[in-house]
Amino acid sequence: MPTTYYLAISAVLFIIGVLGVLVRRNAIIIFMCIEMMFNAANLAFVAAARDLKQMNGQVFVFFVMVVAAAEVAVGLAIIVALFRNRESVDVDEVNLLKY
């Protein structure tokens, strides 16, 4: 398969993730869309590394996955704390930083 197919799939996944972040108001859905955008970027890195026959992209993907795993742990803890406090995960209802 040509690299352009992988990059096209990556672009489609990234666009779906951006649209999900902009359109949806549920914090868990937004969180999943951000993870989808991370995975789209990872796919692009792996496709470029395969095309260039280098390991740099795959090593970078490893580090992105480590950061994404840490983000999942912290993000889900924040979402659970918000749900326990407000009993809703709608981002329009969360106004903790406002006076």
Image: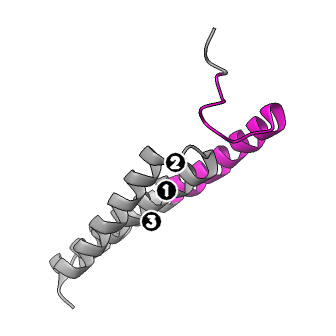
Residue 72 magenta-highlighted = yes
Dot 3 or dot 1, earlier in sequence:
1
Q: Looking at the figure, which quarter contains the N terminus?
A: bottom left
Q: Looking at the image, which residue is at 67% across and 21% down?
A: 96
Task: Please say if the residues under marks 2 and 1 sit with CB atoms less than 8 Å apart.
Answer: yes
Residue 90, percent from left and from top: 65, 39
Q: Identify the residue under disc 1.
A: 33
Q: Looking at the image, which residue is at 55% across and 57% down?
A: 32
Quadrant of res 9: bottom left
Q: Is residue 50 above or below residue 75?
A: below
Main secondary structure type of the part rendered in magenta:
helix
Q: Secondary structure at mark 1?
A: helix
The type of residue carrying mark 1 is: Cys
Q: Identify the residue under disc 2.
A: 24
- The outermost residue toward the top is 99
How far apart marks 3 and 2 lie (CA) works out to: 29 Å
Q: Looking at the figure, which quarter contains the C terminus?
A: top right
Q: Is residue 19 above or below residue 42?
A: above
Q: Which residues are magenta?
A: 66-95
Instruction: Tell me the number on the disc at residue 62.
Output: 3
Q: Looking at the image, which residue is at 23% across and 73% down?
A: 8
